Amino acid sequence: MVDWQAAAQNWILNSINFKDNTTNSPPNRAKHLNTATDKDYSEPL
């Protein structure tokens, strides 16, 4: 990177555009990993 200070300044200026983006994201992406059945990992596949 040639000018990291200019890059940081642009990042700060553009951060305003991305602040509202968090409202459109899913509330908790890890929930899709939950299963309805209990798994017994001692059983072989």
Image (tube, rainbow, N blue to C red):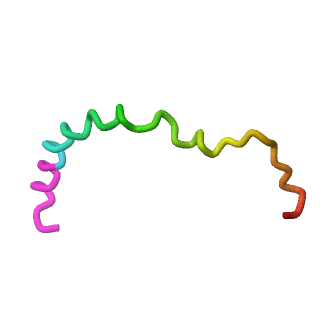
9 magenta-colored: yes
Q: Quadrant of residue 2?
A: bottom left
Count how many numbered circles sit on residues in the image: 0
The answer to whether 36 appears left or right of 29 in the picture is right
Across and down, in percent, residue 8 comes to 16, 51
Principal secondary structure, stretch drawn in magenta: helix
The answer to whether 38 appears left or right of 22 in the picture is right
Q: Nearer the viewer, residue 19 or 4?
A: 19
Q: Hey, which residue is sitting farthest right in the picture?
A: 43
Q: Nearer the viewer, residue 37 or 13?
A: 37
Q: Hey, which residue is sitting farthest bottom in the picture?
A: 2
Across and down, in percent, residue 17 comes to 19, 39
Q: Please say if 27 is above or below 44.
A: above
Residue drawn at the location 12% of the way across and 48% of the way down: 9
State the extent of the magenta-drawn residues as a range.
1-10
Q: Hey, which residue is sitting farthest front in the picture?
A: 36
Q: Nearer the viewer, residue 7 or 25?
A: 25
Residue drawn at the location 84% of the way across and 64% of the way down: 45
Across and down, in percent, residue 14 comes to 16, 44
Residue drawn at the location 45% of the way across and 37% of the way down: 26
45 magenta-colored: no
Across and down, in percent, residue 28 comes to 51, 37
The answer to whether 8 appears left or right of 20 in the picture is left
Residue drawn at the location 12% of the way across and 55% of the way down: 5
The quadrant of the image that shows the N terminus is bottom left
